[in-house]
Image (cartoon, helix red, strand yellow):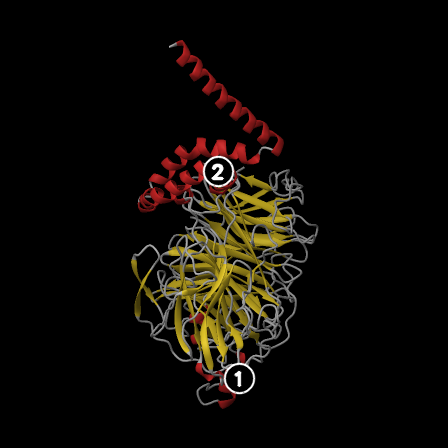
Amino acid sequence: MRNRSISFFTTVLAISSSFFFTSSILANILDTTFAEEGVVTTSIDHYGDAAKAVIIDKNNKILVAGTSDNGSNLDFSLARYNEDGTLDTSFNFDGVVTTQIGSEDDHAQAIALQANGKIIVGGYTDSGQDTDFALVRYNSDGGLDQEFGLGGIVVLPIGKGDDTAHTVAVQTDGSILIAGAAGGTSGRVAAIARVDTYGSPDQSFGHAGVVFSGGGKDTVINDLLLQEDGTILVSGQYKDRDGTTLLLMRYLANGQPDLTFGLAGAADTEPIYSTETTGTSIYLQENGAILIAGSTGSDNNQDIALFRFLQHGQYDPSFGTRGMVSRDIDGEADGAYDIVSIPDGIVVGGYSTTNGLRDFVLLKYSFTGIPVKPNSDTGAKQNNSLNIGKPIVEESYVDSPLLRKIEAVNNPEVTVTTTSISSFDDTGYGMAVQDDNKIILVGSSGDDVLKSYAIARYKSDGSAVTATKSTGATSTFIRTTAVTEITRNSAITGGTIYPDSGLTFSSKGVVFSIAPYPTVSGAVESTVFPVDFAEPTPKTPNVSVETKESQSKTIVAPTTLTTKKVSIPGDTDEPVENGKTEDGAGVGPYSSILKDLSIGTRYYVRAYAVTSSGTVYYGDQLTFETKDACFIATAAYGSFANPHVTTLRSFRDMYLKPFALGRIFIDTYYHYSPLFSQSIDQYPALRPVVRVLLIPFIGVSYILVNIGELWRVLLACGTGFLLLFGVWQLRVQRKVL
């Protein structure tokens, strides 16, 4: 088994969020007590893995299901992690298990737990002719449950063509629901199948254990939710002549459409939205209203959307625009795949796209109301409820001052957190919440050849950041600009100070450090927060800046910017671990260029503003990492924290840096290697070639780095002896000559 990169780069897109939503709530930040700085990646097979679903068992261990490439085709895969992010070796001996079902690709899409601790993984399998629904049941130790189906596996041919399952749930009697789409002669239809606890089709459900529903040419169920009365809610999408439209349906416990819901069991969503919409995950509130996470817009430029419907299938006119709140994160395609509850709101997880590459993303929506702790054990999302205002239906929303007033209360505050794990695509798919309300987001990370499981854990204390003397108060009227143009020793950031705080600022800038929550030395820390205020609409002109490498680059930045040199103790060209910028006075946006940073180092940065009385206020904290100097290996493996790159870096630090000749070699390498790394980045086909060439260097480095101290001393003595012996032999040869 190969363990791949463990790294992260996370930033809150505070500038964009502040212009459209108030963001006084606390964003979810990575939990650095989990794995290495909050993120773990695991390579299960040799050719690529993707985690699609996650659930927390009763021992608070993390079960992750997905797909692994064995070199010939894809298999179901399942991994179990301890609370600290390490693999649980009591689970199938090494923490992971893979299962081959059909002769071709097998895709695991969902996971659920039965009351007895057995694990259900659902998805679909390719027989070589078409794809069918597939279920696998594992015992709690990772072994296949021989009492379920045939050797722990159930395959359900549902339709006449390709059938794809995307969600599973366990009912209170142990029956298992699996839902998705079934192939037909004129497109796909929504399909739900139910099997009993032994894997046999439940003949009392629908027709021979299967229910079909069609809403257009192509209807797909993406998520399923069980209500306390036994009814079944599903979300997804269907295609009609105008494009893709959100699907919301409700079934009775026996699989028949619930005719009291919407129009004959389905919400009439077609006339509601002017853009294409999809629903990927569904969530039930305490008052019976329904939240659906999904997207709006075209495939190449969709935005994350949150929809709300009333308990009988009508959209909630008091929520957003016609029952929908959407969010464009960075101007490119974004997608939501799951939704969970935490005490002070709900969280939607998925991906955002920046410069053509995907990153993990969490959107935290903060509502008024009393939350109820979710129950995620069965995968059925039972009692996942949150009281958000009071849904009201009136015939004319436009003429209703009451509804317009309620809308202001019902609409959520939103914060956005993105996490970049590798220099390739990082896509989040599934979420779960632990007992301590920490959020797990799982997905895939890496290039097309070497994707791996990626698991990130985020924490939130459920309240606004409190003011403390040691860290300084985080103020709602200051936003830190997302960090861009990151090189190995420089980066660009900045901030925005909004004008309605009622304060006068004599200086402003950003403060940064290798330690969290950096502060301005000698300043008086603020202990109160000025009130929130209406925020202006930004303008985004292009600004030309000079990086340390003297390459002119164009970035997008708010309005007119001012930049000043970084203020660093000693003001030398030596790498620095902390410092601040001084970027003028007053309010408005500004940018800062951070220079002379340490190579391959994680920094914490936040905007600050100092009043005329000397009190300092801080913006939200962002995190970034300077690029690593192991240019060729990093370019070849796609991440500076790839285990192979880490090994080479450790060898450098242990065997080259302490010695003069080693430092000369490092300087020479730093000077010439960027040319080669740029070629690798430009021509991805070179990556596997370079990886092969690096194997002997990595192997030797691994041995030298991981041998014990005694063996290292013996090796050094042996090497010294061989060198002396060689010198002695040369002298002997010279005397002979």
Q: Which residue is mark 2?
A: 659
Q: Secondary structure at mark 2?
A: loop
Instruction: Give 202 or 351, whichever is nearer the viewer.
Output: 351
Q: Quadrant of residue 172?
A: bottom right
Amino acid type, residue under disc 1 in the picture: Ile
Between circles 2 and 1, the one closer to the viewer is 2
The image shows residue 417, relative to residue 77, as above or below, that is below
Tell me if 33 is positioned left or right of 722 in this view: right
**Closest to the observer: 484 or 574?**
574
Side of 462 relative to 68 (left or right): right
Q: Position of residue 294 (x, y in %)?
A: 46, 64
Q: Which residue is mark 1?
A: 406
Q: CA distance from mark 2 to mark 1?
A: 69 Å
Where residue 626 sits: x, y (%)? 44, 54
Pointer 2 or 1: first along the chain: 1
Q: Residues within 10 Å of mark 2 (few under 14, many from 20)?
A: few
The crowding category of the residue bearing disc 1, from other C-alpha atoms within 10 Å (few below 14, some 14 to 19, many at least 20), is: some
Locate the N terminus by quadrant: top right
Residue, x 33% and y 54% (percent of image)?
549
Residue 315 appears in the figure? no
- Residue at (66% x, 52% y) in the render: 114
Can residue 518 be seen here? The reply is: yes
Work out whether residue 252 or residue 387 is closer to the camera in this orientation and state it: 387
The three-letter code of the residue at mark 2 reads Phe
The numbered mark at residue 509 is none
